Structures are given as C-alpha cells and as structure tokens.
C-alpha cells in the first residue's frame, strides 16, 4: 500500500487569513497547496461565462465536473489561475465571484462533483488544504487540522485594506455586512457547514501578525513530526 500523503488542513471563515497563511506555510515546507475556495469561485465564474442559468444546479454540476483549471505562478511567485486556458486570476478574486461561490457551495451535488478533484491534490511530499470543510469532509484523516478565526471587525478591516491596495473602492460598512451574510450562509447550510472538526486546533488570529500565525502552524506541524525542526 502507498504510504498516505501527509495533509494539513486550514479551515475558517472568509478573510480569516487562511489563504495567506496556507500559501506561506506550503511554500516554507515545500508542500502542495489546495485553495478549495478557488474551485467554488471557478464553478460560479465558469457557469456565468457560459451564460448558464444561475439557479440551475445541473449546469453548475457539469461545470464542476468538466472545467479545465490550471493553478500556477508567474514572475515573482504571484498566483495565476487559468480556466479553459483563460487567465481568470483577478476575476475569481472579486467580491462578486466570492458571493457566487458561496451560493453554488450550498448545493450538495456541486460539492460532491468537486470532492475527487480536491482529493487529487494530495500528492507527495504533502498538502496544505485551505477551505471550509477540509478537515471535516474532504480530508478527515489529516495529520494536522487548524481552524483559523478572527473577529468579524478585524476580518472586514483586512478585506477593506486588500481591496484598497488593489485599487477597488470599498465601504467598510458594506464589507462588514457582506462578511456577516457570507458567514451566516456558510455556517447554516445543510451540507458541510463551516465548523471546526472535533480534532481541529482553534487558532484566533485577531491582533496577531501573519508571521506569528505562520510560526504557530509551523510549530504545530513540528510537534507532530510533519516537517523537520528548522
Ligand atoms: O475561501 P473563499 O472566500 O475563496 O471561498 C469562497 C466561497 O466558497 C465561500 O463563501 C464558501 C465556499 N467554500 C466552501 O463552501 N467550501 C470550501 N472548502 C471552500 C469554499
């Protein structure tokens, strides 16, 4: 039997910093990265690009099954995401794509259609998986599960700063409202709601620097013998 590929899952609500932390941890230890939220964003975007009905589940399932996606990086390590060969890196990061992702993510058939795609990312030497249900549904046997949180105010402020840096206009009040709505939808859906796995390590990043959170995750992995003491 093949030895299992070691997996670290990092789940948590929108703008908790999962994406940033997962990316840095994966790069530091030289493991693969799964940005599962990007797959939900791609399903919503892929369906919109084909002018599919936003309420038609079957059409979205067909996108989830058949879409051709490539994750890579360009130049100085900036991420690049291609959908059917088209560069959609910026498009999938808009608030609109995030809201579309959260909407299609409530459909069990779409989640099921993405399951094998997500598990296929588990390749040696290891995988850091970022999402909402990585530790509960997709990789229940992961060696380390982290549930990353931050206060709603801090998450809205982080998102606000990100958008301003990208040159987008954004109102802090509108962002706070959207984050609260998205949390509510992600936590209350029937299938794979956002919640920590029973064996997850809860990490509250409110008031912590990115480096401090990365160090905490690295040290949890070291304690479990997932990577050498550096
Ligand atoms: O992490 P993100 O903002 O890119 O995720 C976008 C949406 O996708 C989020 O609102 C909920 C959904 N999602 C999910 O249901 N399960 C995941 N594993 C990842 C994301």
Image (cartoon, rainbow, N blue to C red):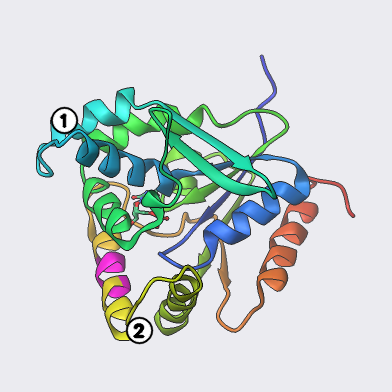
Question: Label 1: few (<14), some or many (≥20) within 10 Å?
Answer: some
For the C terminus, which image quadrant?
bottom right
Which residue is the site of mark 2?
A: 172
129 or 6, nearer to the observer = 129
Residue 224 visible from this viewpoint: no
The residue that appears at 32% across and 80% down in the rendered structure is 176
Nearer the N terminus, badge 2 or badge 1? 1
Estimate the x, y position of residue 144 in percent, counting from the top left: 63, 50
Which residue is the site of mark 1?
A: 59
The residue that appears at 49% across and 77% down in the rendered structure is 161
The residue that appears at 37% across and 50% down in the rendered structure is 91
Q: Residue furthest top?
A: 1
Stretch in magenta: 179-184
Quadrant in the rendering for residue 122: top right
For the N terminus, which image quadrant?
top right
Question: Label 2: few (<14), some or many (≥20) within 10 Å?
Answer: some
Quadrant in the rendering for residue 193: bottom left
Residue 193 visible from this viewpoint: yes
Estimate the x, y position of residue 201 in percent, counting from the top left: 59, 62
Element at label 2: helix
């Amino acid at each position: 039997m093949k030895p299992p590929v070691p997996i670290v899952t990092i789940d948590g609500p929108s703008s908790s910093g999962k994406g940033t932390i997962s990316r840095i941890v994966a790069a530091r230890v030289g493991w693969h990265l799964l940005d599962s939220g990007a797959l939900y964003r791609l399903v919503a975007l892929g369906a919109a690009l084909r002018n599919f009905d936003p309420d038609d589940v079957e059409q979205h399932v067909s996108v989830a099954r058949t879409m051709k996606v490539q994750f890579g990086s360009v130049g100085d390590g900036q991420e690049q995401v291609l959908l059917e060969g088209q560069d959609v890196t910026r498009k999938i990061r808009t608030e609109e794509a995030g809201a579309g992702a959260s909407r299609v993510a409530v459909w069990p058939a779409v989640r099921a259609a993405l399951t094998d795609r997500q598990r296929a990312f588990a390749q040696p030497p290891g995988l850091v998986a970022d999402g909402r249900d990585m530790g509960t549904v997709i990789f229940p046997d992961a060696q380390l599960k982290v549930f990353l949180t931050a206060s709603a105010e801090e998450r809205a402020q982080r998102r606000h700063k990100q958008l301003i840096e990208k040159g987008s206009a954004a109102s802090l009040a509108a962002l706070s409202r959207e984050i609260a709505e998205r949390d509510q939808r992600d936590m209350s859906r029937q299938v794979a709601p956002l919640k920590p796995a029973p064996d997850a390590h809860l990490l509250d990043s409110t008031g912590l620097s990115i480096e401090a959170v990365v160090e905490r995750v690295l040290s949890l992995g070291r304690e479990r013998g997932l990577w050498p003491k550096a």
